[in-house]
Structure formats: structure tokens, C-alpha cells
Image (tube, helix red, strand yellow):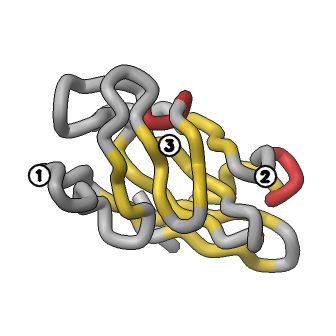
Amino acid sequence: MSDWKKICTLADIPRLGARVVQNAGGDIAVFRTAADEVFALHDKCPHKGGPLSQGIVHGKRVTCPLHGMNIALDSGDAVAPDVGHCDKFAVKVDGGDVYLKI
């Protein structure tokens, strides 16, 4: 059995936005960039636990809506001078469908 789970279509995720996938280990935010790249991170800012899914996506980063911490979508690492890390998850787009590896 495959570890990949279909979660939605690419069109279901707003450009420069996110969609939340509920998971037993904590919610996962699936982000879509302006270039239609898709990334998945634990939906919890490492600073104070803010919901990254409600943040502003710009380039390959998301800015936490609570305190402005920037997180790199491709690594989950905070962008200097901030320090911290969010767990990232494998995600792919195939035939317009978005799959998450859980």
C-alpha cells in the first residue's frame, strides 16, 4: 500500500495560500506558491505555535500571522535572523491532484 494520500486538486489550494490537512500528529499546512509549487509543513510556527496556514506566502516563504517569523517552505527552517524549524512533509502534484506522504 502506498504512503501517498490524495488530499485535493491543485485548484483547491489558493495561489499564495494554503489548505489544512488534519493529521493525528498535528495539522499539516499545504502551501501553493505563485509559480504553482506545492510544499507541506507542520501547521505550527516554531516561535509561538501560530497557524502558518493563515500566514502570507511570498516566494518560497511563509510569514507567520502572529509575530512575522519567516519560514522557508522548501526546508521548514526559519529565515535568519530568526531561528527555528517546522517539520516538513513530502508532497507532489500528479495530473492536477495533490498527494501528501504521511
Q: Amino acid at mark 1?
A: Val
Q: Amino acid at mark 2?
A: Arg
Furthest residue toward left:
83
Q: CA distance from mark 3 to mark 2?
A: 14 Å
| In the rendered image, the vertical position of residue 9 relative to residue 55, given as above or below | below
Q: CA distance from mark 1 to mark 3?
A: 20 Å
Relative placement, left or right, of 36 versus 23 is right
**Residue under the image location 20 percent in, 60 percent down:** 80
Furthest residue toward bottom:
94
User: Where does the image place residue 58, in percent across and percent down from the top left?
Assistant: 59, 56
Q: CA distance from mark 1 to mark 2?
A: 27 Å
The residue labelled by disc 1 is 83
Q: Amino acid at mark 3?
A: Ala
Q: Which mark is residue 15?
A: 2
**Residue under the image location 11 percent in, 52 percent down:** 83
Q: Quadrant of the C terminus?
A: bottom left
The residue labelled by disc 3 is 29
Q: Which mark is residue 48?
A: none
